[in-house]
Image: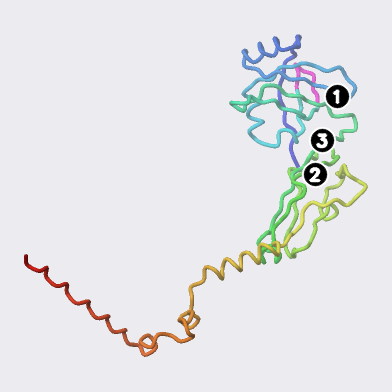
């Protein structure tokens, strides 16, 4: 489960592009807190502290406690705008967690024991349909990932959400069907035929399978194991007549 991280922030009295630029010049990152039927609040975050949390990973799927000058908010980062060149944060949107503490978040999928899958050993391919799954879960019990064990999986097998061991209190957003997470697909028939043809074309010719000479018989000299006699040399040209 992900742990609750804490970030300190200061209130930003003015909104707009001018105030956001001024915050960045002062070494801060402008942000906004919204949701839970409350008035949005504009804040500033200290750049270095925010950047440390972003570098840790899973920033948008980790619950955050924002301490805005003594007032605390439990939030989730919903959008992080980054600089297109330096890839550093420019603005963050935080959504407040409701009173029930349940949030909607995407959890990545992790596949293990690929070497123990007979289907993959036979040349099958793991076709991932969903790299992450949206779920409802308590803000303080957000999983880092969902794990799927591929041990014993044969070609043609499909892995559905019902095969995922969801912790208590966590449920998928899609409830009306048992959707597919991944499949073990086999190689296409056309690919196998093309590979066989390529292998046959590149194989060295066997001495016994060599094509016979014209007339259906090999050259006598070659059959007898003797070298063919050399052709007679042409007679030397006569010297030119004296004038």
Label 3, secondary structure: give it: loop
Q: Which is nearer the N-term, disc 2 or disc 3? A: 2
Label 1, secondary structure: give it: loop
Q: Residue at x 88, y 52 (%)?
A: 178
Reading the image, the residue beneath label 1 is: 35
* 39 on left or right of 17: right
* 154 on left or right of 167: left
Q: Which is nearer the N-term, disc 1 or disc 3? A: 1
Q: Position of residue 190 (x, y in %)?
A: 69, 63
Q: Which is nearer the N-term, disc 1 or disc 2? A: 1
Image quadrant containing the C terminus: bottom left
Mark 1 Cα-neighbour bin, 10 Å: few <14, some 14–19, many ≥20: some
Q: Nearer the viewer, residue 40 or 209?
A: 209
Reading the image, the residue beneath label 2 is: 133
In the depicted structure, whether residue 27 falls above or below residue 131: above
Query: Are circles 1 and 2 on residues that touch, CB within 8 Å?
Result: no
Q: Quadrant of residue 104?
A: top right
Reading the image, the residue beneath label 3 is: 139
Query: Are circles 2 and 3 on residues that touch, CB within 8 Å?
Result: no
The outermost residue toward the bottom is 224
């Amino acid at each position: 489960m992900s742990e609750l991280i804490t970030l300190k922030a200061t209130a930003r009295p003015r909104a707009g592009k001018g105030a956001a630029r001024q915050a960045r010049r002062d070494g801060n990152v402008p942000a906004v807190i919204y949701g839970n039927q409350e008035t949005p609040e504009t804040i500033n975050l200290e750049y270095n502290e925010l950047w440390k949390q972003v570098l840790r990973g899973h920033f948008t799927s980790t619950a955050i406690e924002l301490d805005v000058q003594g007032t605390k908010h439990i939030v989730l980062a919903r959008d992080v705008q980054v600089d297109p060149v330096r890839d550093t944060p420019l603005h963050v949107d935080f959504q407040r967690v409701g009173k029930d503490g349940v949030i909607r978040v995407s959890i990545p999928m992790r596949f293990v024991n690929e070497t123990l899958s007979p289907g993959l050993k036979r040349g099958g391919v793991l076709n991932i349909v969903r790299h992450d799954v949206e779920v409802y879960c308590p803000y303080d019990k957000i999983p880092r990932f969902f794990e799927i064990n591929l041990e014993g999986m044969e070609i043609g097998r499909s892995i559905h959400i019902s095969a995922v061991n969801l912790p208590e209190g966590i449920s998928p957003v899609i409830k009306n069907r048992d959707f597919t997470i991944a499949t073990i697909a086999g190689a296409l028939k056309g690919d196998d035929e093309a590979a066989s043809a390529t292998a046959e074309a590149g194989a060295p010719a066997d001495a016994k399978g060599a094509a016979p000479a014209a007339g259906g018989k090999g050259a006598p000299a070659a059959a007898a194991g003797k070298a063919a006699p050399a052709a007679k040399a042409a007679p030397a040209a006569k010297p030119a007549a004296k004038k």
